Image: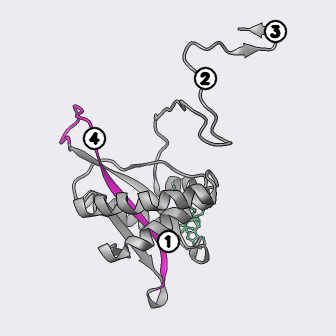
């Protein structure tokens, strides 16, 4: 397990693309088109110190997976020791040949250790269907986040019912 360097940028971009591909939410064309934006975004956040990525390596230094903590800006709240930023786990990806051998688990545990050392109080993430059991096993809990899709985002993600729009019932308008 090692901290990613600036020279790992292409690896991190490739893993982020592969993550989207495996999550089946977007077409390969959409994902390729996002790669340049991902590269620029990761480079900027990495240079600013807000993107802390970890790379898992197997025998002979072969890359097995990677993942990142993004320190996103957090709003003030009345808790103890409020911080201006909060760690968010993202871009988790394990190479197919290395799956189900604890790579992601070790990556996330490393991130938890890192965040604890830095004095953060909580880590959040959005889990894919494949990732959720892994995070739950580590101890992540489901939270109270809600969302409202303003537009249809994909075949499995329709727009949410618009405010004030009546729900159709079988016998006309409800
Ligand atoms: C989700 C993902 C990152 C998990 O990576 P992984 O390295 O296979 O995860 P782990 O090996 O730590 O855990 C996976 C499973 O293997 C099991 N496992 C862990 N170590 C094991 C071992 N030594 N032997 C056998 N199984 C093991 C875990 O218990 C876990 O079981 P579960 O799926 O029933 O919960 C990977 O599947 C992936 O890259 N998916 C596509 C992208 C994606 O969805 N990313 C997450 C975005 S939130």
Q: Residue at x 54, y 17 (%)?
A: 163
**Mark 1 beta carbon near ligand 1 (under 8 Å):** yes
Residue identifier under label 1: 103
Please tell me whether residue 2 is drawn above or below residue 30 in the rendered image: below
Where is residue 77 drawn, in percent x and y? 24, 33
**Mark 2 beta carbon near ligand 1 (under 8 Å):** no
Q: Is 14 contained in the magenta span?
A: no
Q: Residue at x 40, y 55 (%)?
A: 89
For marks 3 and 1, give the CA distance: 53 Å
For marks 4 and 2, give the CA distance: 29 Å
For marks 2 and 3, give the CA distance: 19 Å
- Disc 3 crowd rating (10 Å Cα; few below 14, some 14-19, many 20+) is few
For marks 4 and 1, give the CA distance: 29 Å
Residue identifier under label 3: 171
Q: Quadrant of residue 97?
A: bottom right
Which numbered disc, 4 or 1, marks the residue closer to the eye? Answer: 4
Which numbered disc, 3 or 1, marks the residue closer to the eye? Answer: 3
Where is residue 12 drawn, in percent x and y? 43, 68
Q: Earlier in the sequence, mark 2 or mark 3?
A: 2
In this rendering, does residue 5 appear at all? no
For marks 4 and 3, give the CA distance: 47 Å
Please tell me whether residue 66 is drawn above or below residue 117 in the rendered image: below
Q: Earlier in the sequence, mark 4 or mark 3?
A: 4
Q: Earlier in the sequence, mark 3 or mark 1?
A: 1
Name the outermost residue toward the left: 81
Q: Quadrant of residue 2?
A: bottom left
Camera-nearest residue between 38 and 20? 38
**Mark 4 beta carbon near ligand 1 (under 8 Å):** no
Q: Residue at x 27, y 57 (%)?
A: 50
Residue identifier under label 2: 161
Q: Are marks 2 and 3 in contact (CB under 8 Å)?
A: no
Residue identifier under label 4: 74
């Amino acid at each position: 397990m090692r901290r990613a360097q600036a020279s790992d940028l292409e690896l991190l971009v490739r893993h982020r693309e592969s993550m989207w591909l495996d999550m089946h939410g977007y077409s390969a064309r959409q994902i390729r088109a996002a790669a340049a934006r991902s590269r620029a975004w990761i480079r900027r956040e990495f240079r600013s110190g807000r993107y802390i990525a970890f790379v898992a390596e197997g025998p002979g230094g072969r890359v097995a997976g990677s993942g990142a903590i993004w320190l996103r800006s957090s709003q003030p709240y009345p808790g103890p020791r409020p911080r201006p930023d909060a760690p968010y786990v993202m871009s988790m990806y394990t190479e197919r040949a290395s799956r189900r051998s604890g790579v992601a688990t070790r990556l996330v545990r490393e991130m938890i250790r890192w965040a604890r050392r830095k004095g953060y109080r909580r880590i959040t993430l959005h889990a894919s269907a494949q990732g959720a059991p892994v995070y739950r096993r580590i101890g992540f809990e489901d939270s109270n986040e809600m969302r409202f899709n303003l537009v249809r985002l994909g075949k499995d993600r329709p727009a949410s019912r618009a405010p004030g729009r009546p729900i159709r019932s079988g016998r006309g308008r409800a």
